[in-house]
Structures are given as structure tokens and as C-alpha cells.
Image (cartoon, rainbow, N blue to C red):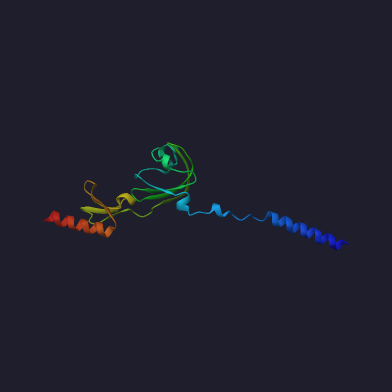
Amino acid sequence: MAEPAKKHESAAVKSEEASKAPVPFSANAWALKESANPGFYICVPAGTTLDDCLSPAVWANVAGKMRPYSTIEVHWADGGQFAEFYVESCGRNWAGVWLMRHHVRETAVVRPIDRTELAVSFNGPVDKYRVTRLSDNAVLQAGFASSSEAQRWADEYRRKLAA
């Protein structure tokens, strides 16, 4: 008689385990990230601190376009840092974000072509590569897709100055 009781107990244990099994996710909850809740991108000026980005007020001009539970990629204009934030909540002129990841570039961003005259540097995704005069730090030309393209422009600029 003890045998049928054990079988009954094991069936009860199996049904308990089956009820604890995770429920499969609904197909309606699945979507392409870009279409369901797109992420955002912003290029901030050099000198902006990470604490500045965590302040709700700093997002005042763009908060109206945000959605809760989306992400923001933050690129510094000088190419020195990158951060990603998660939008926890937002309103018309504020956004509560928390930091997901942050990277500081360890190598120098400015790579001089000719130390006496011009420098080519990457100034973020807006200006891209630019040519700067070192004597007064004036930006002569910006928007080059590659450093070699900027260097060709700088060489041509030097030839024009020499003529």
C-alpha cells in the first residue's frame, strides 16, 4: 500500500515543478528595438562632465522628444569620452537618466601633421576630422570623413600659403 502513495506524491511534486516553470514570453512583447523604442544620440561639448549628464535639467531642450525606457548615446565633441544612459522617466523639460556605461579615451585625440603649423584632430561625429592652426587654435576646415582626407587638405593649404 505504500507504493501507490509514493506514486501519488511524485505526481504531485511533478505538477508543482511544472507550475514553477517559467511561462514563455508573449509574441506581442517581441519587437525590433529601433521600431518599438528607438535610442537617441547626442554630441555634447568638450568639458561636459558625467555629473552634468546625470542632472535632469541638462536635458531640458530635448526631453520632450524622449520616451521612458529608451537609451541615449552620449559622445563628447573632442572624442575623449563615450557614455550610454537609460531614460527612467521624462517630462516636457526634464529627464531622469541612469548611467549604463562610460568609457574615457586613453590615447591622445589630437594628432599633429606639422607641429609648427597645423593639426588634424577628430572632433566627434558632428565635426568629424578637422584641421586646426596650432598658433591660435583656429579651426580652418572641418567635416572630413577621414584623417587622410584632412591631411590632404592641409597639405594643399600649405602649398597655397607657400605660393
Q: Quadrant of the C terminus?
A: bottom left
**Residue 58 position (above or below residue 38):** above
**Residue that protrudes farthest toward the left in the picture:** 163
Q: Quadrant of residue 160?
A: bottom left
| Left or right: 149 in relation to 15 | left
Instruction: Please name the residue shown 70% across and 57% down the image.
Output: 18
Question: How many numbered circles are shown?
Answer: 0
Residue 86 lies left or right of residue 13; in this view the side is: left
Residue found at x 44% / y 37%? 94
Residue 82: horizontal and vertical position, in percent? 40, 50
Q: Position of residue 73 (x, y in %)?
A: 42, 49
Q: Quadrant of the N terminus?
A: bottom right
Q: Give the x, y percent position of residue 97.
A: 47, 43
| Foreground pick, 29 / 60 | 29
- State the residue at coordinates (85%, 63%): 3
> Outermost residue toward the bottom?
3
Q: Residue furthest front?
A: 28
Q: In front: 142, or 115?
A: 142
Above or below 21: residue 94? above
Depth check: give the residue in front, 58 or 137.
58
Which residue is at a point 61% across and 56% down the rendered structure image?
A: 24
Reply above or below: 156 against 38.
below
